[in-house]
Amino acid sequence: MRGTQLGEFEELVLLIVANLYQEASGLRIQEAIKERSQRSASISMIHATLQRLKKKGFLTSEYDNSSITERGGRPRLLFRVTQPGHAALLKARDLRNDLWDTIPEFAFRY
Amino acid sequence: MSKDRLPLWIERYLEKWLDPELHAGIFGDLLEQYHHDKQTDGIWRAKIRLVYNVLVLTWYRGRFTENKLTTSVHLISSIMLFNHVKVSLRSLGKHWGYTSINIVGLTLGFACCLLIGLFVQEELSYDRYHEKANRIYRLAAHVQGASYENGIAKISAPWGPEAQTILPEVERSCRFVFYGQTLISNGRDSFYENGGLWVDSTVFDIFSWPFNYGDPSAALSAVNSVVLTQELAQKYFPNENPIGQILTFDNNQEMVVSGVIEDIPDNSHFTFRYLVPLHGYNPPDHGDIWTRWNQYYTYLLLKEEASVSSVGDKIDEMLALHLSTEDAEAYTPLLQPIQGIHLHSKLHREMSTNSDISYIYIFSIVALLTLLIALTNFINLFTARATHRTKEIGVRKVIGANRKSLFGQFIVEALLVSFLSGMMAIALSYIFLPFLNSVLNKTLALNLVENFWMSLGLFCLILVAGFLSGVYPGLVLSSLKAVHVLKPDAADSFLRSFSGKGHRALFRKGLIILQFAIASFLIIAALVVNGQLRFIQKKNLGFNKDQIINIPMSSPGTLAKARTLKHGLLQIPGVEQVSMSANKPGGSDYGVPYEAIGLEQNEQPPMRCLVVDEDFLTTYEMELAMGREFSSDMPTDSSAYLINETAAKQLGWDNPLGQLLAMPAVDREPAPIIGVVKDFHFHSLHEPIGPLYFFMENTWYSQVNVKLDASRMDETLAAIEAKWNEFEPDLPFRYTFFDEGFASLHAAEASTARLIKWFTYLAILITCLGLFGLSAFMADRRTKEIGIRKVFGASMVDILRILTSEILILVLIALLIAIPIAYSVSTHWLENFAYTIDFGLGYIVFSIILAGGIAVLTVSYHVFQSALKTPISALKYE
């Protein structure tokens, strides 16, 4: 298995998936990223990231069976954060908080 | 909606490799976004986005495949790519003979495309550099008379300003008038300068010529101001700021330099070296200002939203107000977009000679044809070489290569050759660019870093060429079955179907036919173009253009002494005849209005005139059809007229002698026509001979025409210069040879012809290369056959006949295709000229002999080599 580190974009996607909870389909994730971070990412890029996260074991996916006409009857693929995913997010946050806490006062004086 | 098959293809494509678990979800997202985009951004943006997304998915496809051991082999997978390149390099190196033929051919083809692409790009860029180029129009006119019709590029004074005043759509108007040759002095040096224009002060509101010094808005407001181009400024005021400096024009007029602009770019349909304000211009009084004195090149800047056709209609209505009913009917305004003038405008009295869109087509076609020949070579040789690769392909198949990966191998090989050729073509183009520039008289520059479109175009061309030439061989060779290697007979029969007989050989034969058709087409085209140009150079113009020099005489002082100068020159032993005139054949036009007494307005065609003295006709050896020439013994001749035969015909008099012409605009009373001059070519052979009249006017002369004795030119020229310096010690002696100036009227054709000739050589060369390679291969394949034939007693001649006849049949078919096309294209081109050669049988015969000869010669080289071997070595060769 690939390493269990989170990339910056991966972390963003993972957090968004957690935020959306039961609504985390590809296009909703894309929208939310745009809303929350003003970044535009193509849907394919998002899926590529989701797959990577899935292979790291941070996500699971399942189909939502209420079909929608615009999609030509194709069901939505919904993503959900797994326990290891949760742990990785916490780890990333702890690391950051830790680092913030130990920044000397003078570091940001210009 | 039924046409929108893109999502269908994409679904099928994704199905091939996307994890089936994910397929419905991801494709669903794509589809949903596609439909959404289609509503908001339009179908094209939606499609582009969809394809982009699919490409991104493809790039990351490793993440979407199932976690199984078997991975499908993609066309270009990164691991195989290195192997493909390695194997390609080996195979190319092993058959370096074929490889070099391919590379040389493709290099020449690409270089052709690149150079011609540069030329075409430059031609299409004319006048597009003005910021408002898409709104600038030239106002010209079409004149329809009873016995004539004409499009004229310059019109009378009031059209432009009036249009600007009364039409809200016209933002600005601006007029240019030729300034004529001037002696300019900066107090230290003086030179004769051409290329001056009178111009309205609005000029810089319309045209964007960048200023180096001075203020565009005020540059031409003072009557005695002058705007110089950088080149002229540098000449008179090297390394100083020219603003405010004084230049003396013709020794009597002081002009203040008020601005310096960059030199006018080469891609402008007219050029100049200095500008003086038009409000200082005093046109002669010439009656009706709306139709007389058509000397103004008029440009209009239209407003953003203006419709050109409605502006044209409104100008037509404006003319109806100001012109007499007859004139208003005769004149139709023409609005020409400035970007199109260089390639599309063919009016009388253009500011400078324009090019023609047909050259763009001709050159583009020639470039593509040359490339096509080179590509055909590549495909042919590549396929033919299959024989040498059966083992390689068989072994690959046995090991487990599938068709896709074999196909990839050949595409990679073709792309390698293509890219290598592309690189060499760039180098070659750098080498040949100066040559092309000298032929075309242009200053093209090859700068692939800055010239984004050219680089992109070349890159795509290389890519497409590589793919095209790799696809067919790839398809054929990858269809070889592994069993062919294990059973050599099977392989042999399979491959013979490409190299020898059988339906697959048709494709190769088709390619050879295509090559020869293109080559013969080019041969015929080159012959016709050359024939026509030689015809023009040799054509009897109706006068003798040789050994005449023209000495400009623009200073009023010289004009006063002109008679004495003329007599002085006549005493020089090598001078045969001397005459003075205001203009000359092939030179600038004098469109002075005249009146034919007793004829209606619409029976009087616009005529050109030659302002000459009594010795002009003898100097140029023009002949009289009836009547007599001007004579110095007859004082009344100073007001009399000569006309040419066309004028006599168009004016419609039964006997023109004694009929009266007058020129009220320049105060010439009615006076009789005393003679009719035989028609001669006053202008280029593009135009039929037009009506022309001659008169004498002492004060108008601006040049001395001297006919020299051919045997002692140099000493005569020296003597003339000495005589000139005696008369005008302050003015430099300058002269031009008349025939050179006249030849420049056909300069465009001359350079076209030379280029087409060179490209034809190139095309023939590439064709020969290909045929040479192919026949080497064929002779090689048939070594055994030749051996057996010899054993049974066939002679050299028999073998030659058998092998070359195959090629000859192909050449004949090619000629059958090429000749009709060449015939129709050439006759179409010849219609550009008023006087042409006929498309003779000779061209066809010659091209048949040439194409056939080339084919036989190339093929027989190899056949000879095989046939000369003793039969035993031929039979033993396997």
Image (cartoon, coloured by chain):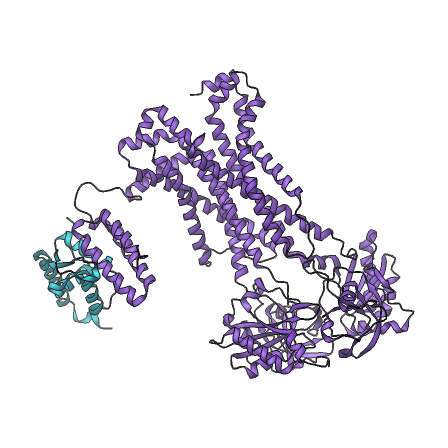
Chain colours: A cyan, B purple
Give the quadrant of residue A62: bottom left
Viewed as shown, does residue B509 lie left or right of B660? left
Which quadrant holds the C terminus of chain B? top left
Residue B272's place in the image compared with B547, above or below, is below
Count of numbered marks? 0
Q: Position of residue B185 (x, y in %)?
A: 70, 73
Viewed as shown, does residue A26 lie left or right of B289? left
Residue B694's place in the image compared with B255, above or below, is above
Viewed as shown, does residue B744 lie left or right of B137? right
Q: Nearer the viewer, residue B102 or B330?
A: B330
Residue B16 visible in the displayed image: yes
Q: Position of residue B354 (x, y in %)?
A: 61, 62
Q: Position of residue B655 (x, y in %)?
A: 84, 67
Q: Nearer the viewer, residue B209 or B754?
A: B754
Q: Residue at the location (45% across, 18% down)?
A: B876
Q: Residue at the location (32% across, 42% down)?
A: B81
Residue B419 visible in the displayed image: no
Viewed as shown, does residue B19 lie left or right of B8? left
Q: Residue furthest right?
A: B633
Q: Nearer the viewer, residue B194 or B771?
A: B771
Give the quadrant of residue B468: top left
Q: Residue furthest left?
A: A83
Q: Position of residue B211 (x, y in %)?
A: 54, 73
Which quadrant holds the N terminus of chain B? bottom left
